[in-house]
Amino acid sequence: MTDTEIGITADLVRDLLQEQHPDLAGLAIREVAGGWGNQMWRLGDELAVRMQRMHPTPELQLKERRWLPVLAPRLPLPVPTPVRFGEPSERFPKHWTVMTWVPGEPLDHGTISRGAHAADTLAGFLQALHVEAPAEAPIATDRGAHPRNCTGGFENFLRAVVPDDIAADVRAVWDDAVAAQAWEGPPMWVHGDLHPANVVVSDGTLSGIVDFGDMFAGDPAWDLAAAWVLLPTATAARFFDTYAHADEATIRRARGLAAMKSLFLMLMGKNGDQGLPGGKPHWGPLGRAALDRVLKGV
């Protein structure tokens, strides 16, 4: 069942609130642009309603409900924290969650002008997040593996979007990541999906991190790729100096994963240019800029 078949509207959101959390039903409701697996609606000034949309199971929302209240208190940037749970009903047979609103503008619609500050801020956030996860923490499903186990996806992206004149250079970065030693430390908490739509900016720097549905316990290189995917040119080295816990092999894996993530952004941009479902035209330039940063190294 798609969101069109369900018909997610402001009226539906208000009706669901009236049924399950009537004390919130009088707040203003505004649709938030973007979102694929979940649709967001602003609720008043301080809350948001996260509606399960394309995801076939509630796993990602349930994961956020379980773990964000555990992680949020020790993170140095605002993150969305669940405050009310919405359960499936006859009106809407999927899960929905009322969460705190993280103010700022998504980076895919904003810019970072204070690069050094953003590098230090991201490094501090990931230092706080990347601690050993408990045994019951979620494990990765479609991400989190060593780059060598992601070669099929990388090759597909490479063929789809990389110009011939840089293909060899991109492949060299990937091959170096594939050859890097695997993560041998304990499984660490990892956000898992740091890209420009999942961070918010204000005053020219990072000001919040959102969408923890893909969080898992594993290799922190998957987050450290953000040094190239999110930060401006020539700030990756400062980021890794401030983060201070990444060895050479981890940085090599992270750079390869950043290449793959950049290609994914470029492919989503291409899909958007072609009018394909889920495509985002404005992601293409973001992906190409990130790929250029990857090729320049730290």
Image (cartoon, helix red, strand yellow):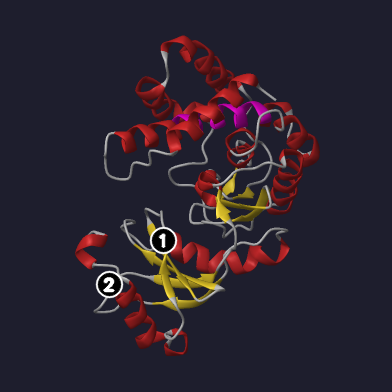
Distance from disc 1 to disc 2, alpha carbons, whole Å, reads 14 Å
Vertical side of 160 occupied by 278: above or below:
below
Mark nearer the N terminus (1 vs 2): 1
- What range is drawn magenta here? 251-263
Tell me the SS state at disc 2. loop
Q: In which quarter of the image is residue 272?
A: top left
Residue at 56% over, 26% down? 256
- Residue 281 as seen in the image, left or right of residue 293: left
Using the image, tell me which numbered label, if any, was put on residue 93. 2
**Which residue carries the number 1 mark?**
59
Residue at 74% over, 37% down? 239
Query: At label 1, which amino acid type do we have?
Result: Glu
Which quadrant is the N terminus positioned in? bottom left
Q: Which of 24 and 259 is in front in this view?
A: 24
User: Looking at the image, can residue 193 be seen?
Assistant: no
Using the image, tell me which numbered label, if any, was put on residue 105. none
Residue at 29% over, 68% down? 8
Mark 2 Cα within 10 Å, few/some/many (few <14, many 20+)? few
